[in-house]
Amino acid sequence: MILCNLFEAQVERLRNLNCPWAIVSSLQLQKDRVVSSAAKTEIPGGNIPFLPVIPRSYLGVYGLVQLVVFAGSVGYTHIELAEISDVVRSPNRPYFIFNVEDGHAFLGKSSKEAGVLIEESARSGLTIAEIVSVAIHADVLSRHNIDAVGS
């Protein structure tokens, strides 16, 4: 029941942020699979069981960051799109990531150091789209910044 409530809260958050209906609908159709997969996964304390991700191919970086609202301000970026490339493969349709660590474990580490530690733990770094999802659905920005070592 807790995982179902989490799923519904995440989808509702996207609706409240005026995320396009087609994206929300696509994510909603994945509910049974996502909740079932998360229920079978051991999630360490502090990790997020799952997060919906909207790929850059759907909204672009500028559209994605506008879904981030922190302290009453809407997200923005000054990064040039040509400077962004993902080094981690990810689906080009809305998807979910599981067992997400929000970056707290890597505080005080450079992006390069964090990348090595992530790789050594048999995990993958998060892409720009995945980092945006963390910022949308977790209160991470009130605690620390996060880097997209998968991009």
Image (cartoon, rainbow, N blue to C red):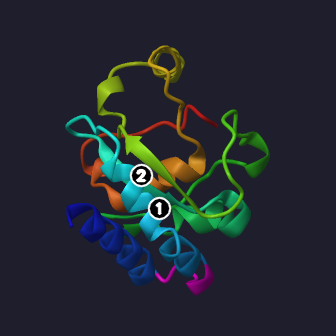
- Residue 60: give x, y in percent of width and height: 69, 63
Residues at marks 1 and 2, CA–CA distance in whole angstroms = 6 Å
Q: Is residue 138 above or below residue 10?
A: above
Q: Is residue 20 magenta?
A: yes
Q: Which residue is mark 1?
A: 33
Q: Which residue is mark 2?
A: 37
Question: In the image, what residue occupies the spot 27% across and 61% down?
Answer: 3
Nearest to the observer: residue 32 or residue 45: 32
Indicate the quadrant where residue 7 lies. Answer: bottom left
Q: Is residue 83 above or below residue 141?
A: above
- Residue 124: give x, y in percent of width and height: 54, 30
Nearest to the observer: residue 68 or residue 80: 68
- Residue 74: give x, y in percent of width and height: 44, 68
Nearest to the observer: residue 97 or residue 37: 37
Q: Is residue 135 visible?
A: no
Q: Which residues are magenta?
A: 18-22
- Residue 34: give x, y in percent of width and height: 44, 59
Amino acid type for the residue under numbered disc 1: Arg
Amino acid type for the residue under numbered disc 2: Ser
Q: Quadrant of the N terminus?
A: bottom left
Q: Is residue 40 magenta?
A: no
Magenta: main secondary structure: loop
Crowding at label 2, few (<14), some or many (≥20) Cα neighbours within 10 Å?
A: few
Crowding at label 1, few (<14), some or many (≥20) Cα neighbours within 10 Å?
A: few
Question: In the image, what residue occupies the spot 57% across and 64% down?
Answer: 64
